[in-house]
Image (spheres, rainbow, N blue to C red):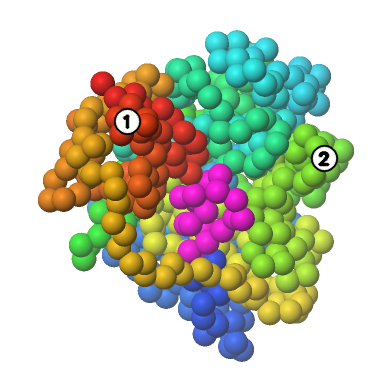
Amino acid sequence: MIRSFNTNGHLILLVWHLLVTLCGATSLFSQSKLLPSEQIDALFSTYSSETPGVAVGIISKGNLIFSRGYGSANLEYTIPITPKTIFHVASVSKQFTAFAIYLLKDQGLINLGDDIRKYIPELPDYGATIRIHHLLAHTSGLRDQWALLTLAGWQLEDIITTEQIVNLMIQQKALNFKPGTAFGYCNTSYTLLAEIVERVTGKGFSEFTYENIFMPLEMVNTQFYGDFHKVVKNRAYSYEFKDKSYVKKKLNYSNVGPTSLFTNVEDLVKWSNNFEKPIVGNKNLIAEFNEVATLDNGNPVIFRIINEDTLYHAKGQLLRNYRGILMLKHGGHDAGFRSFLARFPKERVTVITLSNDEHFEIFARGLEISEFYLKDEMTGSTPVPTTFFDNEKEEKQYDVALKTFVGQYSSEELSTTYTILVEDNELVIHHKRLPNMTLKRIGETEFSGNNYFDFKIDFLVDDTQKVNGFTISNFGVKNVIFNKI
């Protein structure tokens, strides 16, 4: 989860942090005279059989010129990572989902301008039409599924299915913004795209993509993992370093579309090469697929701006002019899995990193490896993002007492209830499935907190100082209403 807008706070802060890490110091290795392969070895020299690690692949002119694994795929059995190791690649999945939609469009089975309720009629009518191209471009205005689930008291290690997510969306009564008018990173959109594929074809999304993408490309180790019970040989499990040791970070997703693609370095070579010499799809389809998405007013969809460096969104890919070179890339992060896939079409180079280490710096390492191989084609220096630091603020005195906000609050849209109490002169949220959350006061009736994602609460206070409820917002949800019981 960097941008110049507030539509995706947690992801924004996460990716911004990673880029700051990249640019805060000059790499020891980028200045050396080592070969690129030796530089990569040095970069990952701290990984061992006792740590998680990373699989790396470099493609040049259609050939896999470097592939290596570092660390272990499974710390309980010390199974080494290799280029054949299968990883959950999180949001790198999205470009495959978008490609499936383009295949249906090419077959004349759908139109990108179709109202999504044509295929999923049980979704609410928000008074503004959400079209398939809005889902592809993250301009739908829909609330993000992970943002909603955490507010509803779910933990991301829970069993989470597509059916549960669709049912949750049916309960929602509002959008974050009018479709087509803004960018807001939304995993829900890609869940619904996968659902549309299923309803149009009559096949499960995993089955459709296997038959129409992975098998024609001979990506024999790749699948959308739609059943968390399923056994997958040679897969990696993910880890986080916590309290001086590694702990498992589990995923129990049965949700495909925005995530849950299982693949490896060797199969991603075939995917990358398909953009150059199409086996699945054709050159016209791929050219349209690689185009920058647009808002309804025709303006390009901007994912992020760092100084004068702009990243544009294009159907599960991000377009960027990185040091004078066109780059199409995306990263992914679920549990402790971290993935990076970047294509440099003119130079015919692709960089792949797949990691099971929560602390692996997706973009920092991916861009650094890119520079190992492409430094002679690059111009200028590595861009350094502007960072902002909040000054310490003097503690304010407020007129409304904390006890005013005490009570029980319920949300129909989330089917959940919070109890808010004053404890040790602080406001604390209680929920039956979550650890207690202390709120920080940031205004007369405004508070902030964290429940996996940072959130903001605005209490609804009338002229008599009576609290009737509150709205809560986070990176992917704006103003969900909780009424005071």
Is 80 placed left or right of 172 in the picture?
Answer: left
Residue 66 lies, in percent from the top left, at 61, 66
Mark 1 neighbour density, 10 Å: few (under 14) some (14–19) many (20 or more):
few
**Picture quadrant of residue 408:** top left
Q: Residue furthest front?
A: 464
Residue farthest along the left direction in this orientation: 424
**Disc sitting over residue 298 in the figure:** 2
Specify whether 352 is left or right of 309. Answer: left
Asked if one can make out residue 6 in the rendered structure from this viewpoint, the answer is: yes
Q: Residues within 10 Å of mark 2 (few under 14, many from 20)?
A: few
Q: Position of residue 295 (x, y in %)?
A: 75, 38
**Residue sitting nearer the eye, 436 or 405:** 405
Quarter containing the C terminus: top left
Residue 258: percent from left, percent from top: 54, 36
Q: Amino acid at mark 2?
A: Gly
Q: Is residue 225 left or right of residue 482?
A: right
Circle 1 is placed at which residue position?
464
SS class, disc 1:
loop
Give SS at disc 2: loop
Q: Say which mark, if any, is on residue 402.
A: none
Q: Residue at x 59, y 82 (%)?
A: 30
Q: Give yes or no for residue 205 being in the magenta stretch.
A: no
Q: Amino acid at mark 1?
A: Thr
Q: Give above or below for 39 relative to 358.
A: below
Looking at the rendering, the stretch of residues picked out in magenta corresponds to 1-18
